[in-house]
Image: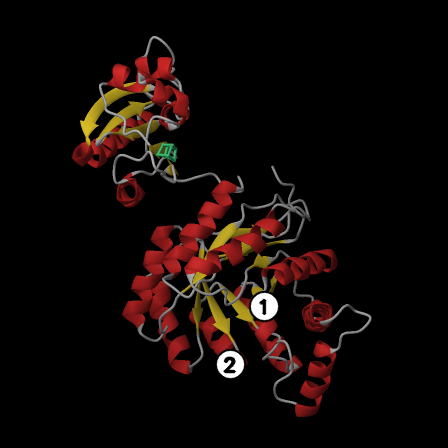
Amino acid sequence: MFERRPTRQISVGNDSTGIVLIGGGLDSTTPAPVSVQTMTAGYTHEIDTCITEINRLAAAGADIVRVAVPERKDTEALTEILNQTSVPIVADVHFHFKRALEAVEAGVHKIRLNPGNIQDRDQVNAVIDACRDAGIPIRVGVNEGSIIERKDKEQRKEELGKFFEKGSMGGKHAMLLALIIAKLEEYMDIFYERDFRDVSISCKSMDAAFTVAAYKEVSKRFDEPLHLGVTHAGPKETGAIRSIAALSGLLTQGVGDTVRISYASDPVHEVEDGLELMYSLGLRERKGVELIACPTCGRIQVDLFTLVQEVRQKLADAITVPIKVAVMGCVVNGPGEAEGADVAVFAGNKRGIIYVQGERVANVAETEILDRLLEECIGFQRRVQAGEAELGEKVVEIVPPDPIGELGSGIDIIASGNVEKATGLTIKKT
Ligand code: SF4
């Protein structure tokens, strides 16, 4: 649906992890699906915990997992971690270029360097050479928080002065953007001079609007694939909005080849939300259930919030084909969504009416809705896998003479009493 910006293409991983392509469209390559990354939250040197976390993130659907390697003991842990995981691993390197060399030696699949804290040309060249020999790419990852000089006091003063100058460039954000572009161009020149093009770029900020502006500018100036993210977005509750606002703004304009949504919470949520963003924008083929649920209102007659959460959790484990499942609170929109879904339930007066591809299969008490819905979903999945049913197909339309079809939907129809007549349910008057 959205035309992707053509980029160079890089690949991460190997035969044992599977190869994840990032970007594409230039040099006769085809753009790869936008990949979803995350980062472990625990210490890398706590090997068993780190392996468990990586495997949990991979099971949640992460295409690539990044780990921090601040100390020698972290890079020493990598060999064992790589032995016991099967997803491409990126070593996140700051300050110490030797950590990058050690990580390459251990066999990681990609290195991330921060131009804000590894600036020595010889050190960068040493990492480039090691990555070239190992055949792995590098991400040049600029962060708003580390772009301004920290070690050289005079330079820092000068950069901060420019940063806060509100002049012809339009204030703080324009100045920051200029600084990011200047540093990126300077840094990327090291790679170009070394003729190393196996690179992706990121330029993260905690400000969603600035993130969009920065990546758009970077996308005009560089043909490397872009890793999108809003850094330090905060807890999931608020960080989700900030991240999705920025990433959707860019992805719908074709900018972005791999993403990380970052939350101050369990990184599994980063993976789940990153994937849901891709599915919602049609950038990835959905795996597993697409869950539709109403927000509930004064017409609700079952505990729908609990039911939806239980359905979500159970189906995430049990269903691997992209079944569309609707969980609706009442007859107002229930029949309509039931028509459009593969498996659906709509509730009324402590009961649930369950449909499979438009065919009414059950009318059960509230306490039985979850189990029966799961049973129907699993049975439907089995039929799809056996080639006996097709996703999105409608076997039976919910139209007259089906009693619910006669009712249609809407508050007037509820008010008329037809719902009760046809279904035998008592509709609570509001
Ligand atoms: S389906 Fe019914 S309960 Fe749910 S929001 Fe719509 S009217 Fe309200």
Question: What residue is at 25 percent from the left and 36 percent from the top?
Answer: 302
Left or right: where 195 falls relative to 64: right
Q: Residues within 10 Å of mark 1 (few under 14, many from 20)?
A: many
User: Residue flagged by tag 2: what amino acid is it?
Assistant: Lys
Mark 2 or mark 1, earlier in chain: 2
Question: What residue is at 52 percent from the left and 68 percent from the top?
Answer: 111
Q: Position of residue 205 (x, y in %)?
A: 59, 66
Question: What residue is at 34 percent from the left and 26 percent from the top?
Answer: 331
User: Residue flagged by tag 1: what amino acid is it?
Assistant: Gly
Identify residue for label 2.
Answer: 98
Residue contact between numbered discs 2 and 1, judged by CB atoms under 8 Å: no
Q: Position of residue 14 (x, y in %)?
A: 46, 56
Left or right: where 150 falls relative to 421: right
Q: Which quarter shows the C terminus?
A: top left
Asked if residue 13 can be seen in this view, the reply is no
The disc label shown at residue 371, or none:
none
Q: Please tell me which residue lies in front, 171 or 277.
A: 171
Q: Which quarter shows the N terminus?
A: top right
Q: Residues within 10 Å of mark 2 (few under 14, many from 20)?
A: some
Identify residue for label 1.
Answer: 141
Where residue 139 sits, quadrant-wise, is bottom right
Q: Please tell me which residue lies in front, 311 or 222.
A: 311
The vertical placement of 101 against 287, above or below, is below
Q: Quadrant of ligand 1?
A: top left
Q: What whole-number distance in Å separates the C-alpha atoms at marks 2 and 1?
A: 17 Å
* Residue at disc 1, secondary structure: strand
Asked if residue 298 can be seen in this view, the reply is yes
Where residue 289 sits, quadrant-wise, is top left
